[in-house]
Image (cartoon, helix red, strand yellow):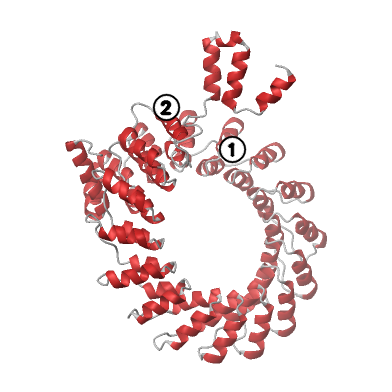
Amino acid sequence: MAHDEIQTAHMMAPLTTARVVCQAHLGVSALSHAVSLVSAFMDYATPRFWSIPRACGRTTTTTDLRLLERLRAHEPPDMDRYHRMHLFSEALVSAVRADNLEVMTWLCTVYCREGLTGNAMREAARSGNVRMLEWLAQNCQDTLLWSFRFMDEAALGGHLDAVVWLDGHPQNPGCSPYVLTNAARNGHIRVVEWLQTHKPEVESSFPLDTAVTCGQLHVAQYLHEHGHHQPNLEISMNFVALKGNLELLEWLHMQSDAEFSQSVLDHAAAGGHLRIIQWLHTHRSEGCTSHAMDHAATAGHLDIVQWLHENRHEGCTTQAMDGAAENGHLEVVQWLHAHRNESCTTRALDLAALNGHLEVLKWLHANRNEEWSVSVMNNAATGGHLHIVEWLHGIQTPGREGATTDAMDGAAGNGHLDVVKWLHDHRDEGCTQVAMDMAATNGHLEIVKWLHANRSEGCTRDAMDGAARNNLIDVVQWLHANRVEGCSTRAMDQAGSLEMLEWLHNNRDEGCTANAMSTYHDDFQRLVFLYSHFRYGCSESVVKWHAFHNRVEVCLWISEHYPEHRNYLLENFPEIAGAMQLIRRHNTDGPQRE
């Protein structure tokens, strides 16, 4: 192609560019295998790049349906029934979120006519989309399991129209005791007022406490006026003080049933709110504890430390200077040294080094006499603070200890190759197998390679096990090709993805144990893969986890393939039991979507 043709093609979409090239060279078009290769190379509508749920989240229409049809064509013909239902549920939620009725219709009439629609209904309620609520209720009657969660979600989002619509629908089962609390949490006063007026029979769970905790004064006042009282608001008051909401504290002070405690002032100090501290000191008698000055010093609030020192008698502990040093507040450290006598501990040195506060370390070195341990340089190396490691190395004396193998181990585990190299060149402590184990576990492949080439300690099976757990397939593949330690069954048991699981199954011999089914993953295909290759049992704790997280389709799959858990699901999880009834009815009567 000429230069100007190349420039023009560069501005075109990829498929258009391929078409231009093929048309410009007629010989290519005559070669069917070449055309097929070009088509396959350019095909972006494959599971490698897309999934049905992800595609349904797009906001366009025509392009969506073409993409969805191509993705559907790529699915295996023997796809597990419940896996398809699971993908359908996620996809329908995405379509609701995108407000795309055309995609919703395709999903319900073409992709999976038996897919359950409860999660989509819940999403519509959460976003307050009454149009979607109406469509789902009308068109998905045979696959919609109504739930009190719908009204709860609408209240949480402050969507009064959706709350009213749901309350008026004959199939809606009502709401939970948390519905008023949900509305109060986010300050949705109109929803709170409506619920108080129209649903007084609902026994609410701590709405006043929640309103106070979340700083919703107008809601708290309304609830208090309408008979909601909380016998113990101490935890809520702590949050109010920590966030600095003086207006809400003043209102609580006026209520005879509100009991304060010393921790309120402690939390105000931690949040740096001097006005609240002064107000509590003037209007309340509870006082505070030594935590107040400790918290203020740790957070660097010198003005509060000074005020407490001058106006209160509780004092502080060694945590004050330790915490200030940990967070680099040198001015606070110096003030405490000059005006208080609690001193500090070796934690001040250790934590200042870990967090990279060289100026604090220099000052402590010159003005304090606490013993320095090997933890100081170890921590500096672990934190990647080479300038501190170099400084400590330069001042090392009999009273200033050096380091241990923990220094290089920690630096390697946290990805600090420059520190690892410096320690290798300037120190004699070396490292242990932990260095490569942790570098591999945390995905620092360059450090793994450097240790392999420059050190002799090697690693253990923990290296590949950890990399597999964290789904670091490039690290696992490198270890497989370049090291001999291998892995243990924990690699497959705790594999971070289906891709990792399949790779280990195809390339390693260790296999897995029944614990592979006991790993909590939000990955349906993982369960199907393990069942098809190993047929291990499924523990009740795994069943409970999926049921608690409302992963209905997974629970239906478990019920079918592990029938010993069916009664447990039926007896303890009404929504799962209801879903089983819907599926049985669907199998008997056939699809009834309108």
Work out whether 243 lies above or below 423.
below
Residue 326 drawn at (x, y percent): 67, 68
Work out whether 313 lies above or below 17.
below
Indicate which disc, 2 or 1, sits on the residue closer to the N terminus: 2
Check disc 2 and report the residue beneath it. Answer: 74
Q: Tell me if 546 is positioned left or right of 26 in this view.
A: left
- The span from disc 2 to disc 1 (Cα, nearest Å) is 30 Å
Q: Secondary structure at mark 2?
A: helix
Residue 435 drawn at (x, y percent): 64, 47
Query: Crowding at label 1, few (<14), some or many (≥20) Cα neighbours within 10 Å?
Result: many
Q: In the image, which is nearer the foreground, mark 2 or mark 1?
A: 2
Check disc 1 and report the residue beneath it. Answer: 475
Frontmost residue, 426 versus 296: 296
Give the quarter of the figure containing the C terminus: top left
Res. 17 image quadrant: top right
Residue at coordinates 40% horizontally, 89% vertically from top-left? Answer: 256
Q: Amino acid at mark 2?
A: His
- Number of labels in the image equals 2
Residue 559 drawn at (x, y percent): 26, 43
Q: Tell me if 585 is positioned left or right of 556 in this view.
A: left
Work out whether 254 lies above or below 527.
below
